[in-house]
Image (cartoon, rainbow, N blue to C red):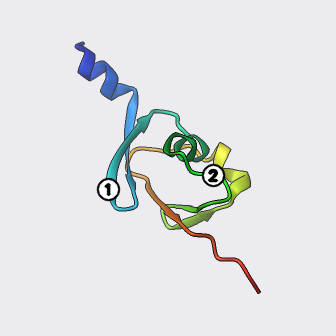
Amino acid sequence: MNASTSAAAHTVTIELDGQAHTVPAGSCLAELLLSMGHAEQAVATAVNQSFVARSKRAITVLHEGDQVMLFQPIVGG
């Protein structure tokens, strides 16, 4: 097995805001946001068109082909 095959086996490709994005296999949504430099409160998140609350990001593991959307949270009354 060459190095590129080994590296590919340890990553998954997701769709992040419509663009292909590679993350380490087993990454969670919270790790993705941290790696991108986003503050936890700065963005709202959805995976496969389902809203993911901040409290669930650390347990939401990303899988091959997942569609991740980041957007500005809506606040107010």
Is 11 on the left-hand or right-hand side of 71? left
- Which residue, given by chain and number where applicable, does mark 2 sit on? 39
Residue at the farthest bottom position: 77
Q: Residue at x 36, y 46 (%)?
A: 21
Secondary structure of the residue carrying numbered label 2: loop
Q: Quadrant of residue 41?
A: bottom right
Closer to viewer: mark 2 or mark 1: 2
Secondary structure of the residue carrying numbered label 1: strand
- Above or below residue 43? Residue 23 is above
Task: Find residue 1 and report its horizontal and vertical position in percent.
Answer: 24, 12
Residue at the farthest top position: 1
Task: Find residue 64 and report its horizontal and vertical position in percent.
Answer: 39, 44
- Depth check: give the residue in front, 47 or 16: 16
Q: In which quadrant will I find the C terminus?
A: bottom right
Which amino acid does the dot numbered 2 rest on? Answer: Ala
Question: How would you rate the neighbour count of disc 1 (Cα within 10 Å): few for under 14, some for 14-19, many for 20 or more?
Answer: few
Task: Find residue 8 and report its horizontal and vertical position in percent.
Answer: 31, 28
Label total for image: 2
- Above or below residue 51? Residue 15 is above
Which amino acid does the dot numbered 1 rest on? Answer: Gln
Q: Residue at x 61, y 45 (%)?
A: 30
Q: Residue at x 66, y 53 (%)?
A: 40
- Which residue, given by chain and number where applicable, does mark 1 sit on? 19
Q: Residue at x 74, y 53 (%)?
A: 55
